[in-house]
Amino acid sequence: MSRSRSSRLALVIPAIAIAAGIAATGTGGLGTVAAAEAADGYEEALVKAEFVERFTRFVEWPRDSLGSSFVIGAFGDDPVGRALGTLASSRTIKDRPVEVRRLSRAAEARSCHLVWIPSGRRPDLPGILASARGQPVLTVGDSEGFARAGVHINLVRDGDRLGFEINLDEARRSGLDLSSKLLRLGTIVGDAR
């Protein structure tokens, strides 16, 4: 792989080691990956999809909420949703095969274990969050203000860095238990700060 391509494929990630085999901090996949420049387009979508998948390793769902497959709902047809579909074909989450569903209506969120909410769905955010509120559905987005609005984990960009915010209060209301490792690496927003 050329130096330029490898630097495009990685973002400075202050939270989760996204590449296989990287565990810089010895915390089971949490760490830092550095690069000279930010990835763009589909490559960035793959990085974000890896983040989303890695988050599930540090979240516990109530036992009775997990069925035979782990269901990820992706609103719209954005690049991260497509990348999640690609990852689903080769991964398991919580020892279950992964099913990615394309969602179009807010009410569909409650039938998933994790819901990806791209920035383009901002107008639908109140309805999506109302549908998922109080349900064991991890909501993940990537738009400024999403965590403060109630999304559990929101990917945020700071220059060439990709980090995340956590709305711990909303995650707890949904019956989800977020690992202390995840909480140390993210920025807590809301009352739980």
Image (cartoon, rainbow, N blue to C red):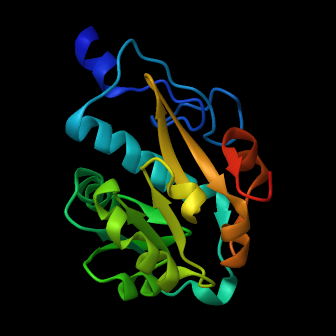
Query: Front-most of 143 and 176?
Result: 143
- Up-down relation of residue 7 to residue 27 (above or below): above
Q: Position of residue 56 (x, y in %)?
A: 56, 60
Tell how many labels: 0
Query: Front-most of 69 and 140?
Result: 140
Query: Front-most of 82 and 91?
Result: 82
Placement of the N terminus among the 4 image quadrants: top left
Query: Front-most of 178 and 6?
Result: 178
* Quadrant housing residue 95: bottom right
Image-based side of 109 in relation to 22, left or right = left
Q: Position of residue 139 (x, y in %)?
A: 51, 67
Q: Position of residue 8 (x, y in %)?
A: 29, 22
Residue found at x 64% / y 53% = 166
- Up-down relation of residue 193 to residue 69 (above or below): above
Q: Can I make out residue 12 in this image?
A: yes
* Residue farthest toward the front in the current orientation of the protein: 123
